[in-house]
Amino acid sequence: MNQQGVSESYKDPKAAAQEAPREPGVYIMRDGDGRIIYVGKAKSLKDRLRSYFSGVKDIKTATLIQHIRFIETIIVANEYEALLLENTLIKQHSPKYNIDLKDGKTYPVIRITAENFPRVFRTRRIVEDKSRYYGPFANVQGVDTLLKLVEKLFPLRKCKTMREKSVGPCMYYHIGRCMAPCSGKVSADDYRRHVERVQKLLSGETESLLIDLTAQMHEAAKALQFEWAARLRNTIKAVEDIAGSDSSVVDFDPESRDYIAWAAEGIFATYTVFSMRGGKMTGRELFRTCSAAEERDSLELFITSYYEPGRPPPAKIYLQFEAQRAKKESGEKPDPQTDALVFRSSLSGWFRGQFGCEPELVITHMAAPLVKHHTAILAMARQNALEDLRRRLKERGTGPALDELARLLNLRSRPERIEGFDIAQLDGKHPVASLISFRNGIPDRKNYRYFKLRSVVGVVDDFAAMREVVRRRYSRLIREGKELPDLILIDGGIGQVNAAKGVMDELGMDSDVVGLAKREEELWLPQAKEPLVLPRSSEALKVLQFVRDETHRFATGFNQRLRSGDLFFPALESVEGIGPKRAATIMKAYGSIAAIAAADPAEIAVRCRISADTAGTVRAAAKLALEDRAAEQRRLNADRGRRGAHSKAGELAAEAAAEEAPEYSALE
């Protein structure tokens, strides 16, 4: 396995900004010598980094930009995590252009002391005396509001030193803000139960408390006690903020830990290592590998290469783990527990032999259930690996995938230009087709097109719809002498493929055509008796899936826009009391006339907020509309039967007429 450490660096910082993900995170800017000169946070890394390279900048920012040579990004779960990680990295590296957080200040935490009768208070100092810490918190005002609530609900002691029992309780006891353990007013067990409740509150177990506070707030508002209701509202917000602030990048656990996750595609894999030291995330490393081995074997090889005498293992290592892929693809049911046991045993022996010690290996399939906090860090590590893998595959390009596609489908040439079609309609109403274009595996959006179909209005006939759109598209390109695609992808099975191929032959086209059926992701070539099924990991299949998904998105979006102003059918509006807006609401709730006809009137009344009598009439009208449509379809079928040998000519005439209909360019 070829292993290469990477830092997502670019020779052109502006290119790094363009390629950055849109997720929240931290960005690190380095100079030509690799020194960190600035650390920043962002809700959207892409938007924030792009802003550095547009518009007029102040002197400080302009100077910073002149010195940037490399940019790397770390994706985190949310803005709160980004804030904390930024704080940690700035204090760790003291970047030249960071000012605000270099003065040693830090965000506050809530401390529950490790005394016989613990206290709870806000602090900025961590003391290693087995006290429990929660946070840190960026919203100091919210922390203070929460502590006032704790003081009211759980009156723990305030004094730094316990008073003599003979002195008696202090003022806090008399005003109900302390249980006076110093005077024996509360037992140790009862006091401990109050402390445990505070710990649950600070750990995010707040559902019952929020329900109670919300009820109190509504009662206060009804009683016109608006000031008290506002205070309760602020308290609820403070509790919600605290409940959602369990940090993955700062957790006060002094035990050294590494978190290892990865993402793989074909022979390519990226491994992410997050390091937690002293309760803080101190770094993240990415490693790129190329290997044809199974994922378990690749992971074992990575770990035995990553840890070395100069980088010994920490006390605990958390690992993302998956059962062997070969078992999945062969149809044999993987056994994650057995695989994980064998994997851990092998690694444990290696660690003992190399380092004389054995770190605790916590494997996802064996730590059931894995603590939410550790799961979140592993998920964050995997997201970073996925982002780097995406960038890596983009850098590589789609050439190899297109070559594989040409080989597997026995195409005339590499399909550098692919066009895809999809049909979308609502029970024959507003039938539309989408055409999307790809060049070298990349969407060519300026050549996307919509078609409003004319020959299949009022009927559901995907084959006729496909023949119409293929004829309209390529007869026009041929007439205008424009370039034809190398490959045409049809969203459908053998029927749609043969329909398209028939038109292509009539037009004298030599482009290749293939269909992709959704259910089993089967590939259908013209006149084939059996489909071609590629492995789900096939890069060629992924190219076709990308094209197919894009055609579906494009066609469905246009169909929805067309019917948004005409969702209601005349049948619904014929019901007394149902106008256009109410008809649109009913159709939006059920999606089709058939669904309305099959629904219970009581359900229609509740979902659409109409009377039971009106709902019954609506369902009856829907049923009548379905019967009318079925009768019309039978009439059309009878007409086709009478036409006999002339049916094909009639269909071609309809398609020829439709060909003259305008082609609708994309609005994007």
Image (cartoon, grey):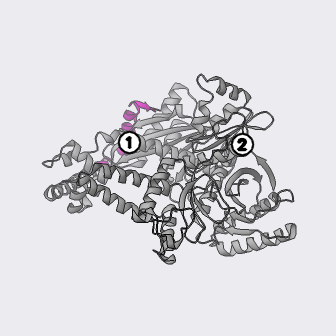
Note whether 149 is above or below 441 in the view shown. below
Residue drawn at x 79%, y 49% is: 4
Label 1 CA crowd tier, 10 Å (few <14, some 14–19, many 20+): many
Using the rendered image of the protein, determine whether residue 625 is visible from the camera's viewpoint. yes
Residue 592 drawn in magenta: no
Amino acid tagged 1: Asn
Labelled disc at residue 197 = none
Q: How many marks?
A: 2
- Read off the magenta span: 639-668
* Location of residue 357 by image quarter: bottom right
Q: Please give left or right for residue 646 compared with residue 42 in the image.
A: left
Label 2 CA crowd tier, 10 Å (few <14, some 14–19, many 20+): some
Residue drawn at x 68%, y 68% is: 362
Query: Looking at the image, which is closer to me, 49 or 243?
Result: 243
Instruction: Identify the secondary structure beneath mark 1.
Output: helix
Amino acid tagged 2: Glu
Residue beneath disc 1: 559
- Tell me where residue 414 appears, x and y as whole percent: 67, 41
Q: Considering the whole magenta stretch, tell me its main secondary structure.
A: helix
Residue beneath disc 2: 8
Q: Please give left or right for residue 524 compared with residue 451 in the image.
A: right
Marks 1 and 2, Cα distance to the nearest angstrom?
41 Å
- Tell me where residue 104 appears, x and y as whole percent: 67, 44
Q: Please give left or right for residue 168 compared with residue 280 in the image.
A: left
Nearer the camera: disc 1 or disc 2:
2
Note whether 180 is above or below 532 in the view shown. below
Quadrant location of the N terminus?
Answer: bottom right
